[in-house]
Every structure is written in C-alpha cells, then in structure tokens.
Image: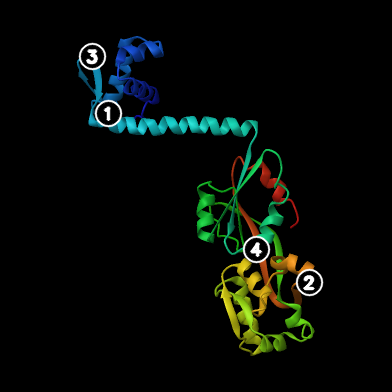
Amino acid sequence: MSQLNYNHLRYFWAVAHEGNLTRTAARLNISQSALSVQIKKLEDRLGHALFERRGRQLHLTEAGRIALDHADQIFASGEELLGTLRDTSRTRNVLRVGALATLSRNFQIDFLRPVLGRGGVEVVPRSGGAAELIRALETLSLDVALINQAPMSDALTPFVAHRLAEQQVSLIGTPARLGKARKADIAALLTAHPVILPTPYSSIRTGFDALADRLGIRPQIAAEVDDMAMMRLLAREDVGLGVLPPIVVKDELASGELIQALQLPGIAETFYAVTMERRFPNPLLGMLLDQGV
C-alpha cells in the first residue's frame, strides 16, 4: 500500500486555512492548476472529496474537516520538533531521570550531583513504580531509571543495568534510644525496641524477616512504610529503630541527631541505574555512570 504524500497534505492544509485556491496558489508561488492537481491526488489517495465549491469559495466536507484536524496536529508536531532540536543544539542538554518513588532522596541527589547546576543542562526528574519506569525507558520517555532491582532483559527490550552501589542496612535510632544500648547484640535490640520497617516484599524487608526467623524472635513493628523519606522522619521522631541504609539518614548521622547501632548481616540494598541500549545515548549519562556513588 502506498504511503500518504505529505506534500499533497501540506497543499491541502494551506488551501483549507486560506479558503481560496487562487490566493493560496499566489502565496505558494505555484499555478492554480498545479495546486488543484495536488489536492486531487490527495483526495484520490484518501478516497474522499475534501472540498465542495460554493460560488468562488471552497468549503470543507466532513472528510475535509477530519483531514484538516489531523493535518493541524501533524504540522504543529513538526514545528515543535524543529524548535526543540534547534534549542537543544544551541543551549540545552536535557536529562530525563526516573527514580523509584521509595528510593532514598539522598542517593538520588548524590547520583545527580555532577550535572546539577551546570550551565545548559536541564534535569527532568520523575518518580513512580518499577514497572512504570521500565515502560518509560522502553518508550524513550526516560534516559535512565534509578531502581533497587535489576530488570529482566531480552532481545526485544535490551536493558543495561549499571550497578552503582550497595548499602548495608543498619539499625538506626535516636541517641536517647540507643545511647546505652548501641553495643547490645542484634537479638537484644530487636527484642527491646520496636522497629520501623519497609513494607512487605521489598528486598530489605525480605532479608529482615529471614534474619528475625533465624534469631527466633518476633520484633514489635512500630510502622510499615513504603517511603524511605517517611522512615527517616519516623526514626527522627523516635517511633522506633529504623531498618535503613545509612545513606537515607546521612545528614542526621553527621549531626548526631540519629546514630547507627549495628549493621544487619546479609541485608543490603543495591542501587541500579537502568538504561536502554541506544544508538545515540544521552551524553550526560557517561558523566553519571562513571562516578562512584
């Protein structure tokens, strides 16, 4: 099947907005007969008449109104494309970064720090669930997705999972709670204090539940939270001991507002930057993926 001729469509588009064949031909610097031929070819291709003549004026048929609506969108998109690429080549480098909604904000900032505040660089952050971010990568709506579990890859969706860092998970609490107890063993701490945990099925929670089972204890759960930022706030409010990677509360640890008791053996969160195999990768990505976070 032959494809739509967009030159024919552009001639139709011009006449439809002008409403007059003679004036349009003069503006486009072609003969009126040549313009009529181009429109007739489009009508033959579409199988519908696009204009009806009333006196000296051309009026759109129903098929013509439908065609004009599509033509408006097509040529507006073309102008937008030209403008975007023109601006990008002159001044702007855009990096579209998606991050798991529950991922540590401190980790995200550390990852993006090399490009933040750089002249001519615009960072467009997005957040969402893992499946949503992966779909956005597939449609090229994102340049990179920050997640804590490497996605499956196959020949149709060749993801590249760049392992950025691994953070051991610790018990973290206020000095008032841990001041005298920070040297106690894990079982004693988990027996004596309530805990703030990620929601079930996260990698941290799975590891914690397995550890508690091995120790033969059933910790009191103060809160189950799906957002690391909320876990950080609850730990600061002394609701219980946070089961967290230290990077989540690095500012509080540095100031002494929170302290780290013990690392939990065998429990860690791994951070990945996931990209698609592309012929033309975003040049800003190399700057980020080569750094040590």
Instruction: Residue at 28%, 20% (x, y): give it.
Output: 40
**Residue under numbered circle 4:** 104
Between disc 2 and disc 3, whose residue precedes? 3
Whole-number angstrom distance, CA of label 3 to CA of label 1: 18 Å
Q: Earlier in the sequence, mark 3 or mark 1?
A: 3
Residue 272 visible from this viewpoint: yes
| Amino acid residing under circle 1 | Gly
Mark in front: 4 vs 2:
2
User: Residue drawn at (68%, 89%), measured in percent from left and top?
Assistant: 192
Quarter placement of the N terminus = top left
Q: Earlier in the sequence, mark 4 or mark 3?
A: 3
Q: Which residue is mark 2?
A: 256
**Cα separation between marks 2 and 1:** 71 Å
Residue 189 is situated, as x and y percent measured from the top left of the image, at 71, 86
- From the image, tell me which residue sits under label 1: 64
Neighbor class of circle 1 (other Cα within 10 Å; few <14, some 14-19, many 20+) is many
What label sits on residue 56 in the rendered view? 3
Q: Amino acid at mark 2?
A: Gly
- Within 10 angstroms of label 4, few (less than 14), some, or many (20 or more) residues? many
Closer to the eye: label 2 or 1: 2
